[in-house]
Image (cartoon, rainbow, N blue to C red):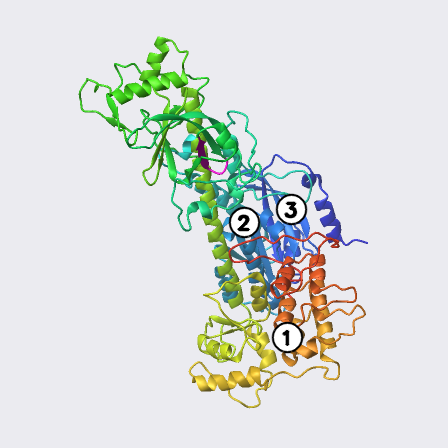
Amino acid sequence: MLTPFFLFAECVMNSQEWTLSRTTPEIRVGVVGNIKSGKSALVHRFVTGSYLAIEAPESDQFKKEISVEGQSYLLLIREEAGAPDAKFANWVDGVIFVFSLENEASFQDMFQYYALLANYRSVSDIAVALVGTQDKISSSNPRAIEDVRARGLCNDMKRCMYYETCATYGLNVDRVFSEVAQKVLALKRQQQLLSCKSLPSSPSHSGGSLPLSVQTSNGGPGNDYSSSLPSTPNISHRELRSEVSIGISTPGSLHRGAKRRTSLFPNRRGSDMEKRSFDSRGEVSGIGRALPIKQSFLLKRSGNSLNKEWKKKYVTLTSNGMLLYHPSINDYLHSTHGKEMDLLRTTVKVPGKRPPRAISACGPSASINGLLKDVSSSPPVIDAPSTKPPTTKSSSTGDVISSPSSNKEPPPSPMSDKKKNRKKKNITPSKTEGSAGQADEENFEFIIVSSTGQTWHFETSSFEERDSWVHAIESQILASLQCCESSKNKARMDSQSEAVAIQAIRNAKGNNFCVDCNAPNPTWASLNLGALICIECSGIHRNLGTHLSRVRSLDLDDWPLELTLVLTSIGNEMANSIWEMTTQGRTKPNPDSSREERESWIRAKYEQRLFLAPLKSPGIPLVKQLFKAVQDKNLASVLLLLAHSNKEQINSSTGDRERRTALHLSCELPHVVTTQLLIWYGVDVKAKDINGHTALFYARRAGSQECVDILLQHGCPNEPTSSMSTPILRRKSSCTSIIRTDSRTALV
């Protein structure tokens, strides 16, 4: 028989409002905490107005209609059982981290959950609140987390709001959800504003002159929250590129070999073009060829300083922000005799047209570089010759320069007459004399100018075609700039994620002081010991050798997820409970001790193992105890057994019927921390079970890409994946490799 809580949860999750599309705008809030945090009582009180002390062991979904700033919203609540995962992070608009003020373990989990959330998404995009629940505080169960510690954690979590609630009486419960919803809406407005400001405001290719398509996710069919995306407005690069129609049919690629690319820009180390991700380069048609957006024959003025003649070129604008031109369509098909330019650092100009003022990208705009957006419905107006200001064109750049206050036009040069005759011959051989005279007076030219001052002059056959090319090129310039900005944001987010991970390490129990001399604020770590050490002790640890201590800097080195999990799961307090159990009357060094005193203590502690805690069951073979400790997920026992072990002991027979080792079992569960520790202490990564499988088989079957990466990194032979019953989970790449593993097994 189901309890009232689970009947309530089942009713809410199966409600039509979860399975049908909605027109009411929604706000997605996740609630995170362990099973002792009181998060279920908090959600139940908010949704139903009553108190229920039962804690839900599984994830649940709830909804409630709320009013924020006078408007109705549907608040979707996802109560997560354990640490957040990637789907959860991509779904939420705001997260409420819940701990119990009388439970130390629930408080310690908070920053780890926060760090794991930051691995998948920038926390600056999410409304974050920290809630301490008072529900279980009593005279027999006093408060354990003081207000100073809770607010200190809130400060570490950056832009976080802190509340203390009591679901029993409803204290601050409605306020928490209401203010989180208000902050979500404020962040959405701020992100919309930033997306407007981040667009280029250059007069040459103002983002305001381009019609942008803004999308907001408002839910969809099905109650699987993983299928939804965050409702933060975002501008799609592909939509920008798809606005421009392809002028002619795209020829297929005949030449499948390597494409010859003669870049007009010099290669720059670490250029913006290199920083753009592969995905932002657009779709690929065939091998080595980006998808063309616009193609046609245009006239291009030669860059030869002696003879600047106009030549017909086959010009192609591609989806990766490149403009290519070839002498003929056959050269384009075979990728020969062509040149290309990257539009990222360029602008496009039209001679005789004054650049428009920069307009906000969020507002409507009626023109692009002074050109009408809909040239088909509104034909261009040609000024009368009498009202046109006298101008002259620079032969080097093609820019229009105002002439002195004289009403006489300078006499045309012979070269100008030749060009005009050639244009009339190549473009409009059948034109009448009147139309030819109009073509002489008005040109269809546009100019691309790079940030280095280089210019490329092109000419079309009509106003409409010129405007279409200018529009398409500006769209690609804008899309390229946005791709470059997104790559910078990604690097910034990775840097923030690493900072959060390091702060999580510092917040582990006992990590405020050096594990060996109690010096404050240690900045170095011993990986296999799971402890932080000061810079003076780190030099001595290095001399011990990597088989005893693997030293790494918190500030200077990268911190992948598996290393972060080891340090956050152990900490100095647990490490010293094993390595300093019995000091035998010796005095521990202090921060002012000499190097000799420190070295004597450290070598006695780790090399001679004089202070090591004794085994609980010395009569049972150590390898069997280790196998059982891994199976029971007892990290402290695993550390103690590894401290007493050597390679021969941990690689001996475990007595398992399938001849599995502790490493096989750790990967099967999977335990990222114990997997890493076992390998550091010398377990054989190539050991096979009775069926001939290494630990890699178990890691892949469990879907733990972190365990797979650890095994391959340390020499485990790769196995074919055809026999895997479950697909391998892809690991999201980042410059710091801080990626989340399964939330319920990573924190062993």
Write down the quadrant of residue 630 in the picture.
bottom right
Residue behind mark 1: 639
Look at the numbered discs 3 and 1 and tell me whether their residues touch, using CB distance below 8 Å.
no
Mark 1 crowdedness (10 Å alpha carbons): few <14, some 14-19, many ≥20: many
Most common secondary structure along the magenta stretch: strand
Residue behind mark 3: 226
Residue at screen point 41% across, 48% down: 271
* Residue type at tag 1: Leu
Look at the numbered discs 2 and 1 and tell me whether their residues touch, using CB distance below 8 Å.
no
State yes or no: residue 705 in magenta.
Answer: no
Of marks 2 and 1, which one's residue comes earlier in the chain? 2
**Which numbered tag is attached to residue 47?**
none
Q: Position of residue 177 (x, y in %)?
A: 57, 49
Look at the numbered discs 3 and 2 and tell me whether their residues touch, using CB distance below 8 Å.
no
On the question of residue 370 being in view, the answer is no
SS at circle 1: helix
Q: Position of residue 563 (x, y in %)?
A: 56, 65
Q: Position of residue 525 (x, y in %)?
A: 51, 71
Mark 2 crowdedness (10 Å alpha carbons): few <14, some 14-19, many ≥20: many
Give the quarter of the figure containing the N terminus. bottom right
Residue range (magenta): 319-326
Of marks 3 and 1, which one's residue comes earlier in the chain? 3
The residues tagged by marks 3 and 1 sit, at their Cα atoms, a distance apart of 37 Å
Residue at screen point 39% across, 11% down: 431
Residue behind mark 2: 180
In front of the other: 184 or 297: 297
Residue 508 higher or lower than 450, as above or below: below
The residues tagged by marks 2 and 1 sit, at their Cα atoms, a distance apart of 41 Å
Q: Is residue 477 left or right of residue 171?
A: left
